[in-house]
């Protein structure tokens, strides 16, 4: 069905159009609520404080890195190297702590490494190399560096500050999720309430128009990739702290989950539209789906299959359904005005 035929099928009222558009736009929020209700009826262990806190702890790295990915996708870019960056940060943090460096020195250093990796990626993208190609190369080469540096071995982490970051809590809420929420709130503010955020969205919306307006497109791209690299490093710290070791295998396939969470939340693959709140909901949905299936005794391999299906559905909703429904709403509105 074409956009034109969709527009001519029926004479929906303005209220009906608004409801339909809202259902599509905020479908993931509704899906999360439905899944929570369904799982609470299916398993007596699902709707428990212990289980919820566990899911929030697992979702934290996805929210942290997804916040950065939201900015990258807002510019019509993508970063496939975040999982590899997590691995490199993981082995560097564990190694430097084992050398006796203070944790308050190690944490800023590994964050700086992540920022520099992201900035280098952004710089190469500004040279005209497609972001997919640049970050795909980073996906393999950065993890390769992690394996070379660690010789393929995991290094235990015993520092109490790191252990608290991964397993501690404050006011009954676990530290990883608190960190994730702070990152998400700051990310929302920057994206929606600052000039940099508006320029980021403008870059992804119509890059040439933004360039004509005098926006520093190259600078914006370098900054969003640097931001994502820094948040990937923070996610690597949280993951390593939770597992109490630094491993070159950390973050395997994490980039796909981050992209799925970001797209599920409503951020456009083509730039110009992004939502931090949606990314948070997307990350929670993925983790609650995985958790629910595990509690129901579903084979772990099928859980991976379901995650892949979620990614496909997210892309379909993002690229096809959203566009068609919004086009239909605009077309029927114009007909009413005529």
Image (cartoon, rainbow, N blue to C red):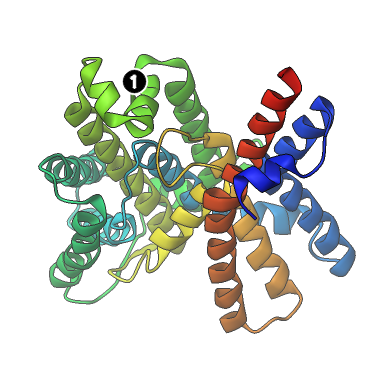
Q: Relative to the observer, which residue lies in front, 54 or 273?
A: 273
Q: Residues within 10 Å of mark 1 (few under 14, many from 20)?
A: some
Q: Nearer the viewer, residue 186 or 92?
A: 186
Which quadrant is home to the C terminus?
A: top right
Indicate the position of residue 282 as horizontal and vertical percent values. 59, 49
Q: Residue at x 16, y 65 (%)?
A: 141
Q: Residue furthest front?
A: 338
Q: Is residue 109 visible?
A: yes
Residue tagged 1 = 196
Depth order, front residue of 6/191: 6
Horizontal arrangement in the rendering, residue 260 relative to residue 77 (left or right): right
68 with respect to 9 (left or right): left
Residue 43 lies, with reference to residue 165, above or below; the image says: below
Image-based side of 50 in relation to 127, left or right = right
Image x and y of residue 1, in percent: 65, 55
Q: How many marks?
A: 1
Would residue 98 be seen by someone viewing this image from the given angle? no
- Which one is nearer the viewer's eye here, 85 or 279? 279
Image coords of residue 11 (percent x, y): 82, 35
Left or right, 227 with reference to 29: left
Q: Residue at x 15, y 65 (%)?
A: 145
Quarter occupied by residue 91: bottom left
Q: Position of residue 42 (x, y in %)?
A: 86, 69
Q: Secondary structure at mark 1?
A: helix
User: What residue is rendered at 72% in x and 51% in y?
Assistant: 32
Residue drawn at the location 47% of the way across and 43% of the way down: 268
């Amino acid at each position: 069905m074409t956009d034109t035929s969709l527009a001519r099928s029926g004479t929906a009222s303005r209220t009906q159009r608004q409801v339909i558009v809202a259902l599509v736009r905020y479908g993931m929020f509704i899906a999360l609520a439905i899944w929570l209700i369904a799982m609470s009826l299916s398993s007596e262990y699902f709707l428990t404080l212990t289980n919820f806190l566990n899911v929030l702890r697992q979702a934290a790295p996805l929210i942290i890195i997804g916040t950065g990915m939201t900015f990258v996708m807002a510019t019509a870019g993508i970063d496939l190297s975040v999982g590899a960056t997590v691995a490199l940060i993981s082995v560097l943090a564990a190694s430097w702590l084992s050398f006796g460096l203070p944790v308050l020195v190690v944490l800023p250093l590994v964050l700086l490494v992540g920022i520099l990796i992201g900035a280098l990626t952004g710089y190469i993208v500004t040279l005209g190399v497609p972001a997919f190609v640049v970050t795909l190369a980073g996906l393999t080469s950065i993890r390769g560096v992690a394996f070379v540096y660690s010789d393929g071995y995991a290094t235990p982490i015993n520092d109490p500050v790191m252990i608290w970051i991964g397993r501690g809590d404050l006011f009954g809420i676990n530290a990883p999720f608190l960190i994730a929420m702070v990152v998400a709130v700051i990310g929302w503010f920057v994206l929606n309430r600052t000039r940099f955020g508006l320029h980021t969205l403008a870059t992804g919306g119509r890059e040439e128009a933004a360039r004509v307006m005098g926006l520093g497109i190259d600078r914006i791209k370098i900054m969003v990739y640097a931001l994502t690299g820094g948040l990937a490093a923070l996610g690597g710290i949280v993951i390593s702290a939770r597992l109490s070791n630094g491993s070159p295998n950390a973050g395997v396939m994490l980039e796909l989950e981050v992209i799925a969470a970001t797209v599920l939340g409503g951020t456009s693959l083509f730039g110009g539209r992004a939502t931090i709140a949606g990314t948070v909901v997307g990350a929670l949905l993925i983790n609650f789906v995985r958790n629910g299936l595990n509690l129901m005794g579903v084979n772990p391999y099928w859980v991976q299959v379901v995650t892949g299906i979620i990614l496909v559905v997210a892309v379909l909703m993002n690229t096809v359904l959203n566009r068609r429904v919004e086009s239909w709403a605009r077309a029927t509105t114009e007909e009413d005005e005529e």
